[in-house]
């Protein structure tokens, strides 16, 4: 799958860039995403290694949407809905957060509903976000915080050139369980001309 070096320059009505690839489009979160967003964050499989337990109350989705939409700021945080080409329904989310333009760094997060796993959608979505981070925002470094038991997520970032840089023991406490974090990082200079290997 080719890396997307020049994402679409379209923007949502509120100025969030729309990133379009061959199979996925990243657009802003909207109120009408509530049902599919709740399906994602209430699914125990999708949330197994997340930093909070699965949602149990629909009010949680409305709080999340309100915060995510209000927090959009290209200088601090960008939240996208992952959709498939030709289908505007939310399949997952991708976020570039803790953006620090002065230091040239940010963190990346992503989640995909299990019904969409194993089809390369997360690979393409991650490539689009990294392209925006390095090519548009001119960041120097992007980091990912992953539960080391989440082998699929570790493989995903490694396919994009991320390097495992350290283990933070018992960093999160989720659902009564102390969870470790693996810190991954990728530098802009390591992505120049790089394509993730085919699935």
Image (cartoon, rainbow, N blue to C red):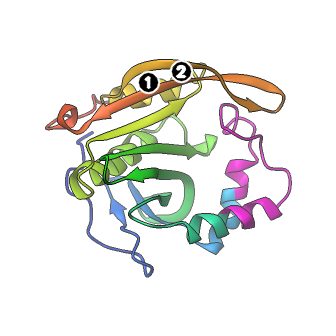
User: Quarter holding the N terminus?
Assistant: top left
Residue 120's image quarter?
A: top left
Is 60 left or right of 149, judged from the image as shown? right
Please provide the residue range marked out in magenta: 38-64
Q: Main secondary structure of the magenta part?
A: loop
What label sits on residue 155 in the rendered view?
1
Left or right: where 186 falls relative to 83 = left
Number of on-image labels: 2
Compared to 170, does 91 lie above or below?
below
Q: Nearer the viewer, residue 177 or 28?
A: 177
Seen in the picture, residue 36 relative to 118 is either above or below; the reply is below
Where is residue 115? Give x, y as percent.
Answer: 61, 43
Question: Would you identify the image quadrant in which residue 50 lies?
Answer: top right
Question: Could you say whether the residue bearing mark 2 is in a helix, strand or loop?
Answer: helix
Residue 151: which disc? 2
Q: Residue at x 40, y 31 (%)?
A: 157
Question: Is there a contact, CB below 8 Å, between mark 1 and mark 2?
Answer: yes
Which secondary structure, mark 1? helix
Q: Is residue 25 shown left or right of residue 90?
A: left
Quadrant position of the C terminus in the picture: top left
Q: Position of residue 36 (x, y in %)?
A: 67, 59
> How many neighbours does mark 2 have within 10 angstroms: few (below 14), some (14-19), or many (20 or more)?
few
Spatial CA distance of label 1 from label 2 is 6 Å
């Amino acid at each position: 799958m080719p890396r997307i070096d020049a994402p679409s320059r379209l923007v949502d009505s509120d100025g969030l860039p729309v990133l379009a690839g061959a199979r996925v489009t990243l657009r802003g979160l909207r109120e009408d995403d509530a049902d599919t967003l709740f399906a994602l964050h209430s699914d125990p499989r999708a949330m197994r290694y997340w930093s909070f337990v699965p949602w149990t109350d629909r009010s949680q989705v409305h709080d999340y949407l309100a915060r995510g939409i209000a927090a959009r700021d290209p200088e601090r945080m960008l939240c996208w809905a992952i959709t498939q080409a030709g289908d505007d329904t939310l399949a997952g989310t991708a976020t570039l957060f803790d953006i620090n333009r002065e230091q040239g760094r940010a963190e990346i997060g992503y989640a995909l509903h299990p019904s969409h796993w194993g089809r390369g959608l997360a690979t393409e979505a991650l490539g689009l976000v990294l392209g925006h981070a390095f090519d548009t925002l001119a960041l120097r470094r992007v980091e990912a915080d992953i539960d080391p038991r989440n082998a699929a997520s570790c493989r995903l970032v490694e396919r994009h050139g991320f390097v495992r840089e350290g283990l933070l023991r018992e960093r999160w406490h989720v659902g009564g369980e102390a969870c470790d974090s693996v810190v991954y990082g990728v530098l802009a200079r390591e992505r120049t001309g790089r394509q993730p290997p085919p699935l």
